[in-house]
Amino acid sequence: MARNIGTDRIGDVYRAVIHFTNRAGQQWTEHEGPYAKAAAARARVTLWSNHMTASGGSATGHIEQATTTWERI
């Protein structure tokens, strides 16, 4: 099913880039999004930071911005 994240009316979208470390010391990076608002992407970084801290690991991250351009194909 397609989803509409509100990009029809805006040109910018955001994603969360999250760097994880589990309690065993293994590290990896994941990307979540796109989101129509920077705050939504920032909230994902906060959520994962809190979750990983509670489970003995850690998570840090930042958000990235991209501009969407729609063209007919």
Image: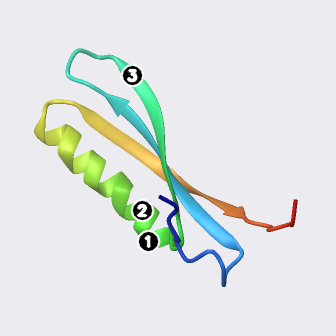
- Tag 2 and tag 1, C-beta contact below 8 Å: yes
List x then y, in percent, for residue 31.
50, 43
According to the picture, the residue beneath numbered tag 3 turns out to be 27
Count the numbered circles shown. 3
- Dot 3 lies on which element? strand
Residue 12 left/right relative to 23: right
Identified by mark 1, the residue type is: Ala
List x then y, in percent, for residue 9.
66, 84
Query: Which one is earlier in the sequence, the residue at label 1 or at label 3?
Result: 3
According to the picture, the residue beneath numbered tag 1 turns out to be 39
Q: Nearer the viewer, residue 45 or 35?
A: 35
Q: Separation of disc 2 and disc 1 at Cα?
A: 5 Å
Residue 18 left/right relative to 68: left
Identified by mark 3, the residue type is: Gln
List x then y, in percent, for residue 20.
36, 32
Identified by mark 2, the residue type is: Arg
Q: Separation of disc 3 and disc 2 at Cα?
A: 20 Å
Q: Residues within 10 Å of mark 3 (few under 14, many from 20)?
A: few
Q: Nearer the viewer, residue 29 or 53?
A: 29
Residue ID at (45%, 61%): 41
Residue ID at (53%, 56%): 15
In the picture, the quarter occupied by the C terminus is bottom right
Q: With respect to residue 25, does 64 lie above or below?
A: below
Q: With respect to residue 57, does 5 lie above or below?
A: below
Query: Which one is earlier in the sequence, the residue at label 3 or at label 2?
Result: 3
Quadrant in the rendering for residue 28 = top left
Residue with the most extreme front position: 1
Residue 67 left/right relative to 55: right
Quadrant in the rendering for residue 34 = bottom right
According to the picture, the residue beneath numbered tag 2 turns out to be 42
- Dot 2 lies on which element? helix
